[in-house]
Image (tube, rainbow, N blue to C red):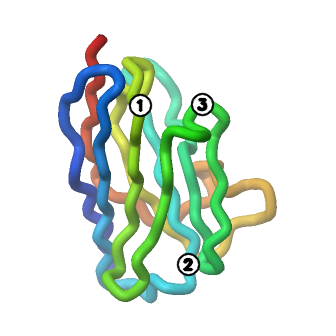
Amino acid sequence: QVQLAESGGGSVQAGGSLRLSCAVSGYTYSNRIMAWFRQAPGKEREGVAAVENDGRTTYTDSVKGRFTISRDNAQNTLYLQMNSLKPEDTAMYYCAADDYVGPGRQLKQYEYKYWGQGTQVTVSS
């Protein structure tokens, strides 16, 4: 049974930092694509960042230069380092995984089979 468990969310002031973690179990983690998504109240879930098994990363434009996605294959853990946080980053953050994602679709939620329950990030101005 595949399980993804996010942690590290919380409340910070604008300009602050948070590091999210996603622990993966029951899954051959090392050769899969992993991603972070977020969903703010009243908005659609959007892709934030993705990392493929060869280390290639993809970011949505609004977080480039501020967020860094990384993975530790030995620890079966995915990370999202978030710096210079803004109020508009407030959302529930989810990690996701799949065996394969088509080219150019790394940040499309419909490409991912496995999902965590989410961790809340709140950024105050």
Of 76 and 84, the residue lying toward us: 84
Residue in the image at 31% along x and 38% along y: 17
CA distance for labels 3 and 2: 25 Å
Q: Between label 1 and label 3, give the one nearer the viewer.
A: 1
Q: Indicate which label's residue lies in the foreground, 1 or 2.
A: 1
| 61 relative position to 96: left or right | right
Residue receiving disc 3 = 62
In this picture, residue 90 sits left or right of residue 69: left
Q: Do residues under tags 1 and 2 come within 8 Å of each other at their CB atoms?
A: no
Q: Nearer the viewer, residue 53 or 105?
A: 53
Residue 91 appears at what percent x and percent y?
36, 30
Q: Nearer the viewer, residue 20 or 115?
A: 20
Earlier in the chain: of badge 1 and badge 3, it is 3
The disc labelled 2 sits on which kind of residue? Arg
Q: CA distance from mark 1 to mark 2?
A: 29 Å
Dot 2 crowding, Cα within 10 Å, few <14, some 14–19, many 20+: some
Residue 32, above or below 104 = below
The residue mark sitting in front, 3 or 2, is 3
Element type at mark 2: loop
Q: Is residue 39 above or below residue 115?
A: above
Amino acid type, callout 3? Ser
Crowd class of label 3 (few under 14; some 14 to 19; many from 20; radius 10 Å): few
In the picture of the structure, the residue carrying the numbered disc 2 is 32
Identify the residue under disc 1: 84
Q: Percent position (x, y) of residue 84?
A: 41, 31
Under tag 1, what secondary structure? Answer: loop
Residue 92 in the image: x percent, y percent?
A: 33, 37
